[in-house]
Amino acid sequence: MKIVINSYIKNNVALNHLLESMKKQDEFKLYDIIVMVGGYYNNKCYEIYKNIEKVDNITYIRCNHNSIDFTGLITLLELYNKNEDEYYFYLHDTCKIGDNFYKKLQSIDLTNVSSIKINKWFSMNMGIYSQKIINSSKNFLLSKKNTDESRSMEFKSVNFQEDYIFNNDPSNILLDNYDGPYCTGEQFDYYNTGTMRIVEYYANIDLYKIKANWRQKSLIDGIWTLNV
């Protein structure tokens, strides 16, 4: 299994924070890690490179589109579609891993698996995908490809269809029957960038998600609302 990080050209602070947490663990070198960086609109094609650190197991791909949470999945479709036996753990740059993340990842049985959600309600497209399920979702993914910088917010807000592949995969399973993350506290400026965020913890995979766009469930009426 490879680890794929969905990122954006302006998210270096968050990306470096995630990578630092990943490099602390001994198991880091056991995984091929692919960082998909969206927002290179002026590039004619994808650019694949190693960064200045020359870390052999990290590959960076500059993507000539910014398709929000789908950037990495679209890139896997367009560049890796022949690797049909491959699996990926897909996460966003606004994450941090815990000490047991790799151990939990290694313990997952991929026999007859096509995709795995990490949360019963909203996985934010994060989880495990087979290349086969990505290939079979070609029409949907290409409909989410954004090559126009002026339309970025439109792609994020209009008919976003989070978890579409998971929800439309009849063979999808839920990791450890996990029904919700734990919110570690009140919102605050986690990255010191002026954006208020909350931190959610996913114990089933030992993963922290630092969220700016988040849903809060009212204890009174049970209605989910979006907070930006």
Image: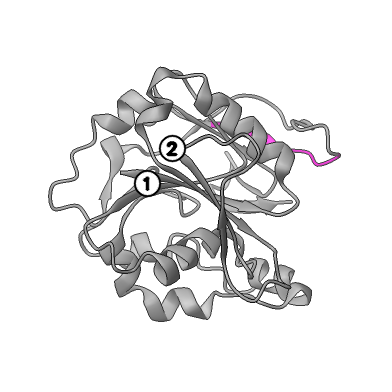
- Which residue lies at the image location 44% right of the left edge and 60% below the top edge? 163
Which image quadrant: the N terminus?
top left
- Which residue lies at the image location 71% right of the left edge and 70% below the top edge? 152
Query: On residue 228, which mark appears?
Result: none
Q: Badge 1, how many Cα within 10 Å: few under 14, some, many 20+?
A: some
Q: What's the distance in space between the residues labelled 1 and 2, CA to CA?
A: 7 Å
Pick whichever of labels 1 and 2 is earlier in the sequence.
1
**Front-lying residue, 2 or 113:** 2
Q: Relative to residue 158, is residue 188 depicted above or below?
A: above
Q: Residue 50 at x, y = what percent?
A: 57, 46
Please tell me whether mark 1 sits on a helix, a strand or a loop. Answer: loop
Q: Is residue 216 left or right of residue 169?
A: right
Based on the displayed image, in which of its 4 quarters is residue 94 positioned?
top right
- Which residue lies at the image location 64% right of the left edge and 40% below the top edge? 15
* Residue position marked by numbered label 1 in the rendering: 120
Please tell me whether mark 2 sits on a helix, a strand or a loop. Answer: loop
**Front-lying residue, 180 or 201:** 201
Do the CB atoms of the residues marked 1 and 2 lie less than 8 Å apart? yes
Q: Which residues are magenta?
A: 194-200
Is residue 217 in view? no
Q: Residue 103 at x, y = what percent?
A: 32, 24
* Residue position marked by numbered label 2 in the rendering: 180
- Which residue lies at the image location 41% right of the left edge and 81% below the top edge? 139
Q: Amino acid at mark 2?
A: Gly
Q: Relative to residue 195, is residue 30 depicted above or below?
A: above
Magenta stretch containing residue 198, yes or no? yes
**Front-lying residue, 221 or 196:** 196
Q: Amino acid at mark 1?
A: Lys
